[in-house]
Amino acid sequence: MNLQFNNEQFSAATRQFADTAAKINTIAIESAQAVFTAQLNAVQERATATFAFLTEAAQVRDLETAKTLWPKGVQVARENVERAVSTTQEVAEKTTKAAEQLGLIAKGQFEDATAKAEQAVQKVTKAVRK
């Protein structure tokens, strides 16, 4: 038995593929943009804090002032590490959310393809039984 694939079916399949690809690209671009923005903001915050500390460190003129600077340096380092961890968690959340959305799209595509395949099988089965 030879099943024909007419132009309407081909156009519909192509349109569905293009729509799905557009959705996937949109999700990927939005996710990449959100990740880039989060990382850029974190770098900016860390750089600002570090440069502020370095500016203060450059003004040290005696040993007593240097002693008070040490705890500030440790505080800046701790805050930078906290920002890095926080940013990593935020990036992981955004990436996971995008992966979930892509998974839902893929699941929908598989379910749609399965339904169409089942319809085709039922149609062929009815034709063979007649």
Image (cartoon, rainbow, N blue to C red):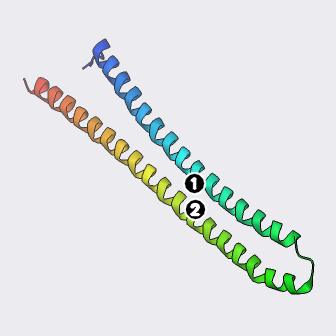
From this view, report whether residue 45 is shown above or below residue 111: below
Q: Cβ–Cβ below 8 Å for labels 2 and 1? A: yes
From this view, report whether residue 18 is shown above or below residue 43: above
Instruction: Using residue 38 as the reference point, say whether residue 100 is left or right of it.
Output: left
Q: Which residue, given by chain and number where applicable, does mark 1 sit on?
A: 38
Write down the quadrant of residue 91 in the picture.
bottom right
The kind of secondary structure element at disc 2 is helix
Instruction: Using residue 84 as the reference point, say whether residue 4 is left or right of it.
Output: left
Q: Residues within 10 Å of mark 2 (few under 14, many from 20)?
A: some
Residue type at mark 2?
Thr
**Quadrant of the frame with the N terminus:** top left
Q: Nearer the viewer, residue 47 or 96?
A: 47
The percent position of residue 4, horizontal first and vertical second, equals: 28, 16
Write down the quadrant of residue 5 in the picture.
top left
Q: Which residue, given by chain and number where applicable, does mark 2 sit on?
A: 87
The percent position of residue 75, horizontal first and vertical second, equals: 70, 78
Q: Compute the Cα span from label 2 to label 1.
A: 7 Å
